[in-house]
Amino acid sequence: MKKLFLLLTSLTLLTSCGMGNNVTINNQTNTQPNNESTITDTSDETKSLYEYDVAVDRSNFSNDDLIYFIMIDRFSDGDTSNNNFEDYSDDKSELKSYLGGDLRGVINQLDYIKAQGATAIWLTPVVKNEPYGYHGYWTSDFESVDPHFGDLDTLKELVETAHEKDIKVILDYIVNHTGYQHEWLNDPDKQDWFHNNGTITDFKNDDQVLNYNLAGLPDLNTENPEVKDYFYNNVLWWIKETGVDGLRLDTVRHVPNEFWNEFAYIIKQEYPDFFLLGEVFVSSPSFLASYNEVGFDSITNYSMYDGILETFRIYGDANKLKIAINNDSKFSNRELNGIFLDNHDVSRLISRTSKHGKAYLKQGLTFLMTYPSIPIIYYGTEIGLEGKHDPENRQMMNFEAAAHNDIYDHYQMLVTLREEIKDYDSVEILEATSDYIVINYTDGDKNMIVAFNVSLFDKTIVIVGSYIDYITQEMISGEVVLKSLESLILLEE
Ligand SMILES: [Ca+2]
Ligand SMILES: [Ca+2]
């Protein structure tokens, strides 16, 4: 087990700031999230900064992992008794209502999930939501499981069963906002738990990004020591109760770094190899990389996502993928970043391009499954589930569609390949034009060449050395035709 490394200098810094009496946690009182706070307030919390040795892999994840991302309500309905509530609208014809998926459904499908090469699942928030909060991001109660999805015991059973199958579990956790109608809004004692600044209108304005309402959702005052205490205790309670292995932190850039820094410290102090994946919905690689120093092990790599989008589409430009790969050097641990083709906030890749969606999806999957980071596969992407904007990108999973499905077959080929290439962690771009890109990976001994032609015309590339085409098992050397809209995976003999 790898340990959390704290730089001695940070401890000195804390002491010199008069903060020797910083965070202390009493394990015994963390059994309920609403217990009286046990985290000692500091005199000047906003200045606290715990430094992490970001070069050290300190989590229980590596780039051998693959995360399968599940929107609980849209995956599998394993318990029809929790589908209908009088106080909710469960209209199955309407994508903005609950459609019946639940934790039991996830448990039932763990073997399918495992067959997708998954070593971990990320679940959309399990917490109780207000009406129409099928996605989980409109919290009405931070301390209970949404009854549409099951209960705490079912969640514990899910984690236990997943662990038996060597699948880790990541919960989605929100501290930036509550649902629109949260009861705290009407509590006279909690008026200073919110910023009350109105909705964000300018995403270039840092004050607005941090302190205004995102999409009108009540923005929590995460500088308020009471709010901090609440969430620091709440998160430890969820981890302890459920035994999950990691968290995907929602809307990270809308909450101050000081909050996350302390949040990460408090978790890692008790669970040193716990995995923290930060959702930072920004393209700048430098900005994304800055979050490693805040305390996140892994960042959703939207810089790479942009490179993928601009490459694998009609009239795409493979130079954009080259730029994104080069920008990955800005991260201190690129290999722990989450890379993805799509998710619940963006169009599915297959539906984004005006033509040849299937071909570009296959190429995108090939890139994702060979590049040395952590692939995040959004449920249904492996079968070519379609959908543009929210909520069309959140259709119900179709397990039957895996049969006679060339995208699924392609994906399964990649799952097998990925097992064989776990040590190919070093990346070099051999050639890139707007039409195609040739990437070399090595394990220090042998090479693997992966090439993509994103143009509508065949191209010829030259391979130096002796290789086997992974798909056809043919010997490849010298000039080779890279067919339009196809990829090549070549393993050195
Ligand atoms: Ca159900
Ligand atoms: Ca905020």
Image: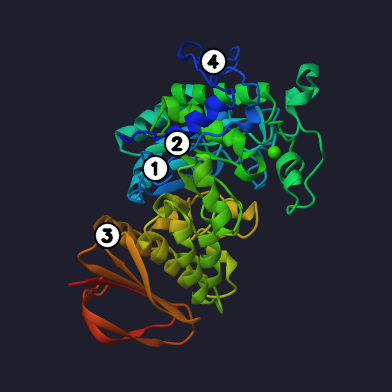
Marks 3/1 in contact by CB < 8 Å: the verdict is no
Q: Nearer the viewer, residue 165 or 450?
A: 450
Marks 2/1 in contact by CB < 8 Å: the verdict is yes
Label 1: state its secondary structure.
strand
Viewer-nearest of labels 4 and 1? Answer: 4
In the drawing, what numbered circle is on residue 435?
none
The residues tagged by marks 2 and 3 sit, at their Cα atoms, a distance apart of 25 Å
In the current view of this chain or complex, which residue is farthest to the front? 16
Label 4: state its secondary structure.
loop
Residue at 40% across, 55% down: 373
The residues tagged by marks 2 and 4 sit, at their Cα atoms, a distance apart of 20 Å
Q: Ligand 2: does it lie within 8 Å of the C-beta at label 2?
A: no
Marks 2/3 in contact by CB < 8 Å: the verdict is no
Q: Is residue 281 left or right of residue 220?
A: left
* Residue located beneath label 2 in the image: 246
* Residue located beneath label 4 in the image: 32
What's the amino acid at mark 1?
Answer: Ala
Q: Position of residue 321 (x, y in %)?
A: 49, 70
Viewer-nearest of labels 2 and 1? Answer: 2
Q: Position of residue 376 (x, y in %)?
A: 45, 51
